[in-house]
Amino acid sequence: MAVIENRSRFRVSVKNRDDLTKHFSYNRLKHVQSYMRQLRA
């Protein structure tokens, strides 16, 4: 049986702040969520 997985990496960006853009591999969702919480604080 075939399995389809999305292995695209995550990109977190802030409008007008290119220096805050970060890329995360597809299996690092916890790191993405942590970085987003840090940006919102």
Image (cartoon, grey):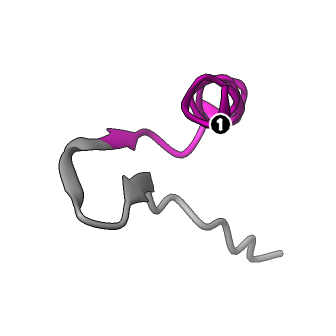
User: Any magenta on residue 31?
Assistant: yes
Look at label 1 and name its amino acid. Answer: Arg
Asked which secondary structure carries label 1, the reply is: helix
The residue under the point 60% across, 22% down is 38
The residue under the point 32% across, 40% down is 22
**Is most of the magenta stretch helix, strand or loop?**
helix
User: Any magenta on residue 29?
Assistant: yes
The front one of 21 and 2 is: 21
Residue 11 versus residue 32 in the image, above or below: below
The front one of 34 and 25 is: 34
* Residue identified by numbered label 1: 40
Left or right placement of residue 14 versus residue 20 in this view = right
Left or right placement of residue 31 versus residue 3 in this view = left
Q: How many marks?
A: 1
Asked which quadrant contains residue 36, the reply is top right
Of the 4 image quadrants, the one containing the C terminus is top right
Q: Give the range drawn in magenta.
A: 22-41
Q: Where is residue 33 in the image (x, y as percent from the top left)?
A: 71, 34
Asked which quadrant contains residue 5, the reply is bottom right
The front one of 34 and 14 is: 14
Asked which quadrant contains residue 28, the reply is top right
The residue under the point 69% across, 74% down is 4
Left or right placement of residue 15 versus residue 30 in this view = left
Q: Position of residue 6 (x, y in %)?
A: 60, 67
The front one of 35 and 3 is: 35
